[in-house]
Image: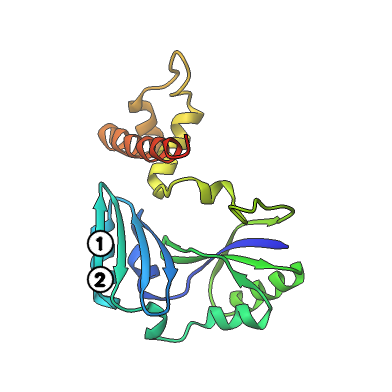
Amino acid sequence: MHEAVIGIEHPGAYADATAGTDTTVELWCNDHCDLLHVGGAGGEAVVAHVEDAVGVRERIVEDDERLLITDDCLKERGDDPIEATLAAHDCLLVPPLRYAEGRKWCRVLALDPANLTAFYRDVAAEFPVVVESKREVRSVRADRPLLTLDSALPDLSARQREVLVTATEMGYYRIPRDATTAEIAAAVGVERRTAEEHLRRAENKLLRSFAETL
């Protein structure tokens, strides 16, 4: 099997809601409604966008993360040409769908790599497309099929990920430390307090995620 993660600039309520923000939306479609995980500091604005589009029946809020159940399924509000293209090329969509940076991010699986190529070609003919990753799937665990490192990690916003990676690369976590939060802030172009807040939230998400597996 072969897998690709593709970002598609396809207009839609959830993709549009994340444009110009560091917020991400993960979607599990249940035909009659959607289950959404919204992560990022701009979550309230994204939730308001979702409420206008499909309504929100229930929500759970914790820090900058939100779990939503919508009133309606977004798929019922219009045809999605991406799904038709998947079917035409015998490709599978692996949930959840992810929306970030104004794009719909699809994790696509195919038995034949030529089918992935054909899917990409047809979608790219209609919409701007970015390929995030490609891999061959050689083995799976029975309890967690198609698990990748990205899917096992918590959902960090783009800015949280940038600050955390920068801090690691600059030696912030070495003993003794090789960088201060002020230097990290300067490297990513934000205020020191903003960098510290992004770092704290990223660390909190990672620690909570790993603690659950201990």
Secondary structure state at the residue bearing disc 2: strand
Residue depicted at x 41% and y 65%? 102
47 sits to left or right of 170: left
Above or below for 58 versus 64: below
Instruction: Tell me, yes or no, whether the two marked residues, 2 and 1, touch with CB atoms within 8 Å.
Output: yes
Query: In the image, residue 212 lies at what x, y percent?
Result: 42, 39
Residue 6 in the image: state x and y as whole percent: 57, 64
Residue that mark 1 sits on: 59
SS at badge 1: strand
Give the spatial CA distance, label 2 vs label 1.
7 Å
Q: Say which residue label 2 marks.
A: 56
Name the residue located 47 percent from the left edge and 74 percent from the top edge.
10
Q: Which residue does the image show at 41% across and 22% down from the upper left? A: 179
Q: Position of residue 109 (x, y in %)?
A: 65, 66
Residue type for callout 2: Val
174 over 108 or under it: above or below = above
* Callout 1 amino acid: Arg
- Quarter in which the N terminus is drawn: bottom right
